[in-house]
Amino acid sequence: MNHNEAPIIVGLDIGTTKIAAIAGRKNEYGKLEILGFGRANSSGVQHGQVLNIDQTIKAIQQALEECYKSNEDLEINEVYVGIAGHHIKSLQTRGDIVRQDAEIEIKRSEIEQLINNQRKTFIPAGDQIIDVIPQDFHVDNIQNIKDPIGFNGVKVGANFHIITGDRNAIRNINRAVERSGLVTKDLVLQPLASASAVMSDIDMEAGVAILDIGGGTSDLAVFYEGILKHTAVIPFGGENITNDIRMGLGVLKSQAEAMKVQFGSALADEAKANAFITIPGLKGMPAKEISVKNLAAIIQARMSEILDFVTYHLKQVGLDSRMLNGGIILTGGGSQLKHLIQLTEYTTGLNARIGLPNEHLAPNHIDELKKPMYATCLGLILKGYSDYDHKYKEFNEKFKKVEVPKKLTVENAETPVQPAAPAASVDAAARKQKFWDKFKNNLIDLFKEEEDQVIK
């Protein structure tokens, strides 16, 4: 794939605390070059659901304006949109089709028919199917086939993971996007988008759980033996932690958020017993002293609750700590809490690490784009490229030439120059690089103690 001979794909992450719009294109090495980036504070979304359409539209338009400011050459019409919320459910089904001629090789159209048949699956009234994901195929007596195209046989079937959501919640997302002047190219479950941004092929094979800790919800996706085994939306996120701090310590929401980000820890035992935060009093009232240890205790209680949900879901699908060799990958804005890795390992019994979307990004991009909170948005772009590569959706044949803006890159960054590789070996090299990038990017000082500071 030559530069400027690929579509520009835009991911739109409509979250509880932020709305982000990122435009990207793959370069000749299969890495994402970010061509535009914008974000805005979200006020019309609660727990992943659009409740106030007008406020959500304003935030989407603000994020789009920021994206256009970062690159004036951009034209954004279609977007891949992430979806989450309490209403998301999943179920397992199995389907088969009987073929007329067993001697003819199985074609892509037959697999698409098999998948489309699952969209007729009975689901509760008021729900709507968001996605149908094949897990593994079988042709006659041959089981556990990853891709049956090219096989011969009388009967071809598959096990499916079907994701459903509330019809009204889906309608509200689509309305907000359309009234912002955009077209929804596809709705993608947020944990699957995040997983594609932070996970490698090796992670999928080893078995891994992706926990995306967002503002309103924490989203879980579990992979084992290269197959998506389970998805779930846990109804707690960073906003719940902030509200717990606000209620427990008697402070304003803005103060609670600032304390969580600057001084928060997921382990009370790691917090200094003699450290205090001074909060200015309201309208002449005396200042308030907040114990850093009490702050950590509140955060630990809520984070432990989220992680208990993860343990419950893993037991539900029979994947305990002995099965998932890849452990848990933490991503999303909430994953940046200090000592969260230790709490996760203690609570679940699994190895844990922070999932950064770096491995899919082209070198030289600014650090802001490498934060875990943008994993969903970058994963949406990767989903668009999966559709493009497999011809699942129609894309314009004429691709506009747009360059990466300087404000989204770091000048004179010391990055290794990638040697030109033969076309056939580029994909293989990229897959190998994914794995090693994980370790390189996770050298984080987990035990760094915060010095006593004062919020003013």
Image: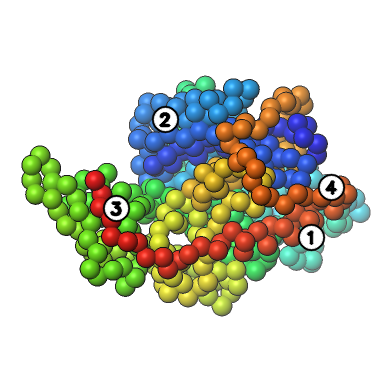
Nearer to us: label 1 or label 4: 4
Residue denoted by label 2: 59
Scheme of image coloration: rainbow
Query: Closest to the observer: 104 or 167?
Result: 167
In the rendered structure, find residue 420 and report the number of the disc placed on it. Answer: 4
Query: Closest to the observer: 229 or 252?
Result: 252
In the rendered structure, find residue 259 and report the number of the disc placed on it. Answer: 3
Q: How far apart in space, not on screen, are marks 2 and 3 (Cα)?
A: 25 Å
Is the residue under label 4 in contact with that under label 1 (CB below 8 Å)? no
Q: Is residue 25 visible?
A: yes
Of callouts 1 and 3, which one flags the residue occurring earlier in the amino acid sequence? 1
Hey, which residue is sitting farthest right in the picture?
Answer: 103
Disc 4 marks a residue whose amino acid type is Ala
Disc 3 marks a residue whose amino acid type is Met
What residue appears at the point 74 percent right and 60 percent down from the top-left corner? Answer: 432
Of callouts 2 and 3, which one flags the residue occurring earlier in the amino acid sequence? 2
Of callouts 2 and 4, which one flags the residue occurring earlier in the amino acid sequence? 2
What residue appears at the point 23 percent right and 56 percent down from the top-left corner? Answer: 277
Of callouts 3 and 4, which one flags the residue occurring earlier in the amino acid sequence? 3
The secondary structure type at the circle numbered 4 is loop
Residue denoted by label 1: 139
Disc 2 marks a residue whose amino acid type is Ala
